[in-house]
Image (cartoon, grey):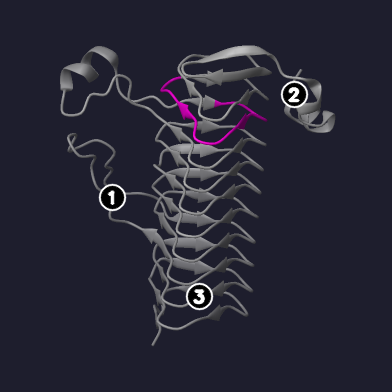
Amino acid sequence: MNQISPKAIIGNNVVFGNNIIIGDDVEIGDNSIIGHNTIIERSKIGAGAKIESNCNLGYGYITPFQGRPDAGVEYSYDRLLIDQNVLIREGCTLYLGSQIARNVRIHHKALIREKSIIGEGSSIGSMVELEGKMEIGRFSSIHSRAFICMGTTIGDYVFIAPMTITTNGNPIGYRRPQITAQFGAERGCTIEHGCQIAVQCVISPGVRIGHESWVAANSVVTKDFAPLSKIMGTPAISKGRLDDIHRLPIELRQELGLD
């Protein structure tokens, strides 16, 4: 039996599965499909969305980080915003305060925490975790089981292969306030437009990887790299300049203002 609030705004030709809960502050656009056993609260969903079964959208039970009771918690968050023609596969959880642009694809059992921003046409793989308060640009692809931490900025047309991790706590300061006092709070990395990150890489806090750089599998990136770098090793070093064949097409480089 479905529980759909009379205060919810439901568009035309919306198809609902079974055992659905729709809260008060919810809007669902025309021609959307909502799968079985899905909960939607405090969300605005654009037309043509497809939400598969067992999803939880607009999840609002924000908790502090262990060891820092007041960190990351706000008294209120904006609604979850999902634009047109977004696909959310089975078993996903999306928190309040996030913004999902049109034509995004979010695959099975992804976890997207508060204030994650995902640009148009990007793809989030199965069992990816976005820690929140981070940004992914347009037409980027984050593959399965990647972990993208708070404070990370990822540009447009970026490819990140499975099991890659970005980090934001250097040095580790768990329950050690003196560490934060000396070194400052967390700071994520920046991965510029057109980068390609191979499988199982670790990107250190505060690192900037210049546009269209290529990072080899199993690399640990601990420092900044210039655009068009070939990066590999533990710790990673530059192995020269990227060949032109591996660059973005010229029309995309012109669009992004890349040299």
In this orientation, does residue 214 appear?
Answer: yes
Label 1 sits on a secondary structure element that is loop
Q: Quadrant of the N terminus?
A: bottom left
Q: In the picture, residue 147 is in which quadrant?
A: top left
Q: Is residue 259 magenta?
A: no
Q: Classify 10 Å Cα crowding around label 1: few (below 14), some (14-19), many (20 and above).
A: some
Q: CA distance from mark 1 to mark 3?
A: 25 Å
Question: In the image, residue 259 lies at what x, y percent?
Answer: 76, 17
Left/right placement of residue 106 relative to residue 177 reads right
Going from the N terminus, do you reach mark 1 or mark 2 first? 1
In this orientation, does residue 209 appear?
Answer: no
Label 2 sits on a secondary structure element that is loop
First to last magenta residue range: 191-206
Type of residue at label 1? Ile
Type of residue at label 3? Gly
Q: Residue at x 30, y 23 (%)?
A: 185
Question: In the image, residue 121 lies at what x, y percent?
Answer: 66, 49
Q: In the rendered image, which residue does mark 1 sit on? A: 62
Closer to the camera: disc 3 or disc 2?
Answer: 3
Q: Is residue 90 above or below residue 79?
A: below
Type of residue at label 2? Gly
**Predominant SS along the magenta part:** loop
Q: In the rendered image, which residue does mark 2 sit on? A: 257
Q: In the rendered image, which residue does mark 3 sit on? A: 35
Q: Classify 10 Å Cα crowding around label 3: few (below 14), some (14-19), many (20 and above).
A: many
